[in-house]
Image (tube, rainbow, N blue to C red):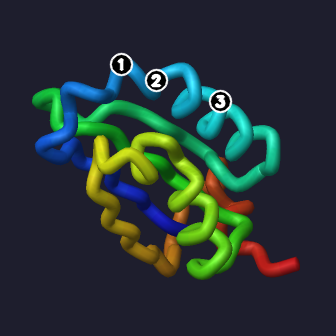
Amino acid sequence: MFCVFLKFSSNKGQASRHMAEHMRWIEQGFEDGVFLLTGSLSGNQGGTVLAHNTTREALENRVALDPFVAQDVVKVEIVEIAPGKVDERLQFLVERP
């Protein structure tokens, strides 16, 4: 499981220009079963994505396709999480196929 932080860069002013394509990128992540959650970081710092069912390399490739990343609207930090104990509602995060 991964947490992807998309923090605004000095190019933040270009966000509205690429928002429609960024939203399509997000939708594709959900359709592909990789994204579990997306949302804004408090303080208008950018956004975050909770991803699973992927490898780090595949996720890095996917993130590189985000128009916000490609146009340097955001800087990316990917943090891998190895779930241990989880609430039963999130059990699917620790189950192996």
Check disc 1 and give the amino acid type.
Ser
Check disc 2 and give the amino acid type.
Met
Check disc 3 and give the amino acid type.
Arg
Residue 38 falls left or right of residue 40: right
Judging depth in this view, the residue of 82 and 35 nearest the camera is 35
Report which residue position mark 1 lands on: 16
Judging depth in this view, the residue of 25 and 4 nearest the camera is 25
Residue drawn at x 28%, y 28% as measured from the top left: 14
Q: Is residue 17 above or below residue 72?
A: above
Residue drawn at x 41%, y 33% as measured from the top left: 39
> Percent from the top left, x then y, of residue 74?
29, 47
Mark 3, other Cα within 10 Å: few <14 / some 14–19 / many ≥20: few
Q: Quadrant of the N terminus?
A: bottom right
Quadrant of res 53: bottom right
Residue 81 falls left or right of residue 21: left
Report which residue position mark 2 lands on: 19
Label 3 secondary element? helix
Report which residue position mark 3 lands on: 24
- Res. 27 mark: none
Mark closest to the chain's N terminus, 3 or 1: 1
Q: Are marks 1 and 2 in contact (CB under 8 Å)?
A: yes
> Percent from the top left, x then y, of residue 86?
53, 64
Mark 2, other Cα within 10 Å: few <14 / some 14–19 / many ≥20: few
Label 1 secondary element? helix
Quadrant of res 77: bottom left
Judging depth in this view, the residue of 77 and 94 nearest the camera is 77
